[in-house]
Image (cartoon, rainbow, N blue to C red):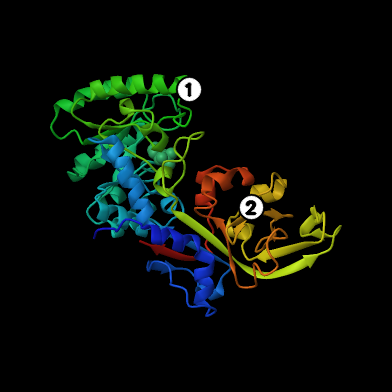
Amino acid sequence: MTVPERTRADEIQAAAGAAARASASGSSAEAPRSVPVAEAGPPVMETGGVLTIDLAALVANWRDLARRVTPADCAAVVKADAYGCGLAEVAGALARAGCKTFFVAHLAEARTLRRAVPDAVIYVLNGIPPAGSAAFADARVRPVIGSMAELVEWDAFCRVNAWTGGAALHVDTGMNRLGLSLEDAAALAPRLDSPDHGIALIMSHLACADEPAHPLNERQIQAFREVRMLFRGVDASLANSSGLFLGPSTHCEVVRPGIALYGGNPIPGSENPMRPVVRLEARVVQVRKVRRGETVGYGAAWTAPRESRIAIAAVGYGDGFLRAGAALGQAQPVAVVVGKRCPIVGRISMDLLAIDVTALPEVSPRRGDWVTLLGEEFPVDAAAPFGGQISYEVLTSLGRRYHRSWRS
Ligand SMILES: *Cc1c(COP(=O)(O)O)cnc(C)c1O
């Protein structure tokens, strides 16, 4: 299947999302948005929030990254339900676009993924739990082996069962999280003399890739270069999203982007080269007047500085939305209402939040309208700091109560 490029008309339609959705409730005859390729969760009418995943943008992001690293292969990291964007839908779209290698964190994720992409190579980053080797072979997935204890178990399993499915060796180059020491890796290198050594990939992970000037980057790149010399002929992988923007010295044979696929900015401080993928809209339950000096919400944490119009929208921390910001009462997060950024005021409740829409014309928004909490107008990287979060947390916190719609 070829995924059509997003057109300008699509963009206009997306920007007019609230209006388009209002039309679905029968108020006008506007054109519907692009057709959903999959839907999940409760029907739109029965929920407070709608999450839309733009698979065309996701695929465009993957192609963009793949082009940047040619001739290296561009894999996809789809752990944590593809960063909250839906594992099966995301992996399916990427596989159809030509992605052949996927990384998840857990075996359970790998099993779900295997059903979506029957032919792809799947790596499990967190490695093998004790006595877990057989389950990996059973699911036809490759463990990323990060300790000698895992390697001993895996080798024994492969020997006894003549299993040749392969594994990745994770070598630690300075992150000190997972991975064999450089010494252990060096001691293993002679096994390459045997044709059935079973090492399909060597990999390491950068600790500071989102800070290009950090001296640890160069130290890790240099250390990994030495590992590659020991494991000549075996494919190697070092770069995550930010890592691959550090330049060709990180590309090796395979890159492993996650966040950039989902529209997160891989080069903080610079303009985001990726397209936004996630759109979150909340339904307006009611719009009310609040007199000057009155307060809104729990803890009376916000006081109206003037007579105000407050839109109450049906998404809250129970949907994973900006909990930390709500608790801290930090800098004001915003919602986009009819194209304008309006402040979210007071504490965020479990199922509701309040938006000061006083600056908008009296007619908008109205009960049943949709406001945008994440989207082209207000991307994940812009929203994250208000919740004391990073883009990764915004995405992986996306709640389970939304109506979900995947579009291409
Ligand atoms: C999560 C993860 C990635 C992807 O990182 P992004 O920053 O999201 O691109 C790559 N490699 C490893 C080992 C990871 O844990």
Q: Which residue is mark 1?
A: 214
In front here: 167 or 238? 238
The secondary element bearing badge 1 is classed as loop
> Are there few (<14), some (14-19), or many (20+) residues within 10 Å of tag 2?
many
Q: Quadrant of residue 408?
A: bottom left
Q: CA distance from mark 2 to mark 1?
A: 32 Å
Q: On the picture, is 146 further left or further right than 278?
A: left
Q: Which mark is residue 334?
A: 2
Q: Check the image and report above or below for 38 versus 82.
A: below
Label 2 sits on what residue type? Val
> Which residue corresponds to the image point at 41% horizontal and 41% vertical from the top-left?
273
Where residue 116 appears, as percent x and y from the top left, is: 30, 59
Report if residue 339 is visible in the image.
Answer: yes
Q: Residue furthest right?
A: 293
In front here: 250 or 142? 250
Where residue 61 appears, as percent x and y from the top left, is: 36, 47
Q: On the picture, is 58 further left or further right than 252?
A: right
> Are there few (<14), some (14-19), or many (20+) residues within 10 Å of tag 1?
few
Report if residue 123 is visible in the image.
Answer: no
In front here: 18 or 195? 18
